């Protein structure tokens, strides 16, 4: 019976530790800034590591030309470029937070987060 209580206390301690780790991860992701551009800098998008768009800049000349189709093409391209950069930074931040912990599958998950394919299993 007492062993069960000790196990429960250990699990609660692990849950608290995981909760503070998750808060730390969230804070790090919110602090990440990634900028993507398209059209030679005509459109610029800034995202944080949580994937939230912080800023969108469209060159005034592009707006004056009233080229809606071009704007519609460049905004997603700049956003996707920023997302790719944010994912790379997320993977780096996660590795630093993991601090060498040997969690099965973590390396593969971080590689896929950064856009890499996991190595084939044999």
Image (tube, rainbow, N blue to C red):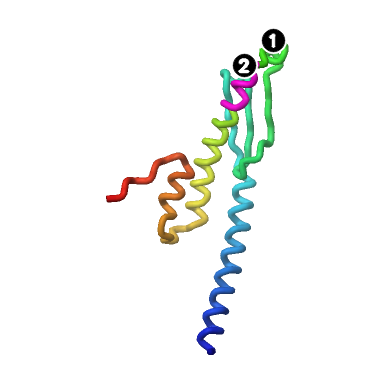
* Residue plotted at (56% across, 36% down): 83
Q: Do callouts 1 and 2 mark residues in contact (Cβ within 8 Å)?
A: yes
Q: Looking at the image, which is closer to me, 32 or 103?
A: 103
User: Quick one: SS at disc 2?
Assistant: helix
Placement of 74 over or under 111, stated as above or below: above
Tell me the residue that label 1 is attached to: 65
Which region is colored magenta? Answer: 69-77
Tell me the residue that label 2 is attached to: 70
* Residue plotted at (61% across, 39% down): 33
Identify the mark nearer the N-term, 1 or 2: 1
* Residue plotted at (32% across, 46% down): 120
User: Quick one: SS at disc 1?
Assistant: loop
Placement of 26 over or under 35, stated as above or below: below
The picture places residue 85, in percent across and down from the top left corner, at 53, 36
Q: Is residue 75 magenta?
A: yes
Q: Looking at the image, which is closer to me, 75 or 59?
A: 75
The residue furthest top is 65
The picture places residue 52, in percent across and down from the top left corner, at 65, 40
The picture places residue 78, in percent across and down from the top left corner, at 58, 27
Placement of 120 over or under 83, stated as above or below: below
Give the left or right position of residue 64, taking residue 18 as reference: right
Give the left or right position of residue 101, taking residue 71 as reference: left
The picture places residue 22, in percent across and down from the top left corner, at 59, 58
């Amino acid at each position: 019976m007492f062993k069960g209580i000790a196990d429960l206390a250990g699990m609660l301690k692990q849950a608290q530790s995981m909760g503070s780790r998750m808060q730390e991860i969230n804070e790090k992701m919110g602090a990440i800034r990634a900028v993507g551009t398209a059209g030679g800098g005509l459109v610029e998008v800034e995202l944080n590591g949580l994937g939230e768009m912080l800023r969108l800049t469209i060159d005034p000349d592009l707006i004056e030309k009233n080229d809606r189709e071009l704007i519609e093409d460049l905004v997603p391209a700049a956003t996707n470029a920023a997302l790719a950069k944010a994912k790379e930074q997320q993977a780096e931040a996660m590795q630093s937070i993991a601090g060498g912990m040997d969690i099965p599958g973590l390396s593969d998950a971080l590689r896929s987060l950064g856009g890499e394919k996991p190595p084939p299993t044999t």
